[in-house]
Image: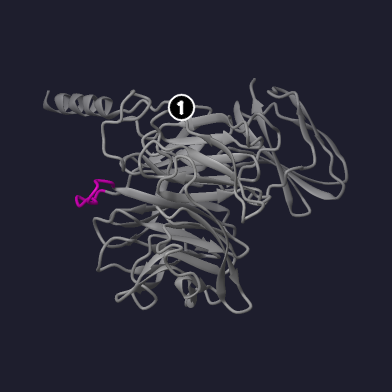
Amino acid sequence: MRTFLAALLLIVGLLANAQPYQKQNINLLGLIAPNKDTIKSPVGNKYSGCWGWYQASKNKEYAISGASNGTYFIDVTAPTSPSVSAFVPGKRGCTWREMKTYQNYCYIVSDDGSPNKFTIVDMKYLPDSVHVVHNGTSYFERGHTIWIDNSKMYVGATTYTSGSSAMTVWSLATPTAPYLLRRVEQDIAPPVFSYVHDMFARNDTVYASTGWQGLHILKFNNSDTSFSELGSYVGYPNSGYNHSSSLTQNGKYLLFCDEVPAELPMNLVNVQNPGNFQPVNSFRPASRTTSHNPLIIGNKWAVVSCYQDGLWIFDISNPPLVTQLGFFDTYPQGGANIGSYPDNTYSGNWGAYPYLPSGIIIANDMQNGLFVLDPSAAYSNTLTNPVGLLNYAEKSPALNLFPNPAANIISLDYSGTQHSIIEIKSVYGQLIYRNEFEGHVIEKVDVRNFQNGTYLVTVSENGQHTIGKLIILH
């Protein structure tokens, strides 16, 4: 009887803690919450920034999850059963922890008060372990955010054991030993801006979110290792604390989020002329949504983390008319899903990573852990699915699959002109079909032995990738 009651109590507890995640066109594959530390951050969050890394030598995918007690390296190759491969401890009780990757190295910063440390981790030994190659203050002690552009590392709000910088840029020519190239205030001093909260950089052009001082476009000049300002955007409608941004692949449009005060809209602006920003659209999922971190895939898809309202995907290919494609609410405790925002501002989805080759999205919720999501339905309005393609072109060779959904035989038509490789994988990354072709491809594929479900069809030709979604329904 005692055993029966214990089992019954366990079942009741599980049911009580089960969360009904509201969603549209984004499905839950896996969820992991490894942080069991009893010391939380001052604002009560257990998780913060996240990033992803693809280990090509072993064909494995990882989520890198920042937490209040350190950094978790999570194997998501099998997305329905994510597992922790390694953990690098950090200062306990941290609110902020951010990371980016370069080659097989992960660079981790935290902006919580002293004592703190900057960490470099070698990931090549995954999934067995990671090796910490630096964990100290010799470069700097703290940073609020980090971005890596080619072989340069930008650190926002860099703090040393003595002194600070609004933003620094470091060379990663030797990845295990960064060296300082420049402090931004050496060239652009206050009152232009005195703090860089976050930045997006591409080919030495830096879109710096400077909080209450707006958005500034900078250029890092390699010839003399100096910064120059190309333009700024301040005092715009509904302006607040300019938090973070992301740029379309063609460099025409920038999407940015203002974090404070709460409930401000996202802004999409034309930045083709850096000296004359042109507002194009202002939008938000719900009237009280606070957007936090955006990431853009190609020129079409915006993946946005929105605190208590979860992860959202928008079609921004027609900038004046932004379309909602899907969402997944990682925070059922509050937000638009229950019609109220009962908790403090810092709750819910902090950040996400949508660039893994399999197409899954990882999203870190501050209270609930790391979500592994399938966004394929949100992208299904086109056969040129952008998942995992950082250099996705506006116009890709046409890929046609018919019928779709399919049960027996599909016709695969690809308008290629050179040598191409076609692969069909499950959303879990399992390779089902592979073949090589020359020129225009017209191929029949027998799918009678495929299990029901969603598959990604990838065509690789001359360094360009086109991805389509195939649904098998027997």
Which quadrant holds the C terminus? Answer: top right
Local secondary structure at mark 1: strand
Label 1: few (<14), some (14–19) or many (≥20) C-alpha neighbours in 10 Å: some
Q: How many marks?
A: 1
Does the rendering let one see residue 366?
A: yes
Which amino acid, by three-letter code, is at mark 1?
Lys
Displayed quadrant of residue 404:
top right
Give x and y (percent) for residue 112: 29, 60
- Badge 1 is on which residue? 23
Nearest the viewer among 229 and 359 is 229
> 255 or 46, which lies in front?
255
Residue that extends furthest to the left in the rendered view of this protein: 2
141 is higher (above) or lower (below) than 318: below
Name the side, left or right, on which 216 lies relative to 117: right
Residue at image location 55% in from the left, 69% down from the top: 152
Taking depth in this image into account, of 302 and 53 the one nearest to the observer is 302
Q: Is residue 293 visible?
A: no
Q: Report x, y in % for residue 425.
A: 64, 40
Which stretch is magenta?
36-45
